[in-house]
Amino acid sequence: MNYKVPDEKLITFIIRKVIKEKGIINSQREFLSLVLRELKQSGIDYRLNGIRLRKIAINKAGVKVEIEYRETGEESKDLKICPVCGNKLVDIYNLTLEGGRIPTGKKCTKCPYWTGINKRVPRRYTFMR
């Protein structure tokens, strides 16, 4: 019943190993399953969730990610933090004919996430080297 939460260094090491062996992983669930399988080989009951795995993979392990989205009816102007990796979002601007700038969306500074005026929600992740 006792379990441990693995530290970021261990997770980063396992992520790099799994990505090197597999190359492309087509879903976050599959990625989590492969990483947990590697962690169980140590004999210690480690627990890890998909969100933490994804954020460490993008921010620490240098894993590239492709994202499939679905668009919602909500506006994205209140969005400040990337829903994929947790980093800062910056505004995307278009120039008007008069030389002014108008915001047309937001993009992440670390991962490929971006959204227009309507909020885009990640649907599926593909992880690769």
Image (cartoon, rainbow, N blue to C red):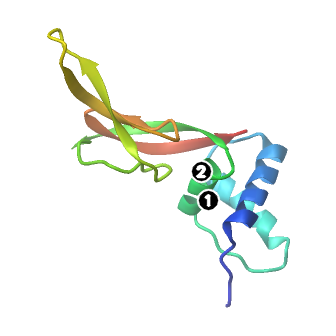
Looking at the image, tell me whether mark 2 or mark 1 is earlier in sequence order: 1
Q: Position of residue 84 (x, y in %)?
A: 48, 49
Q: Position of residue 34 (x, y in %)?
A: 74, 57
Q: Which residue is mark 2?
A: 59
65 on left or right of 10 = left
Q: Residue at the spot x=30%, y=48% of the render? A: 79
Q: Position of residue 43 (x, y in %)?
A: 84, 79
Q: Amino acid at mark 1?
A: Leu
Task: Classify mark 2: helix, strand or loop.
Answer: helix
Q: Residue furthest top?
A: 97
Task: Classify mark 1: helix, strand or loop.
Answer: helix
Q: Position of residue 78 (x, y in %)?
A: 24, 48
**Callout 1: few (<14), some (14-19), or many (20+) C-alpha neighbours within 10 Å?**
some
Q: Which residue is mark 1?
A: 53
Q: Image quarter for residue 66?
A: top right
40 on left or right of 98 = right
Q: Residue at the spot x=18%, y=18% of the render? A: 100
Q: Is residue 112 above or below residue 124?
A: above
Q: Image quarter for residue 76?
A: top left
95 on left or right of 32 = left
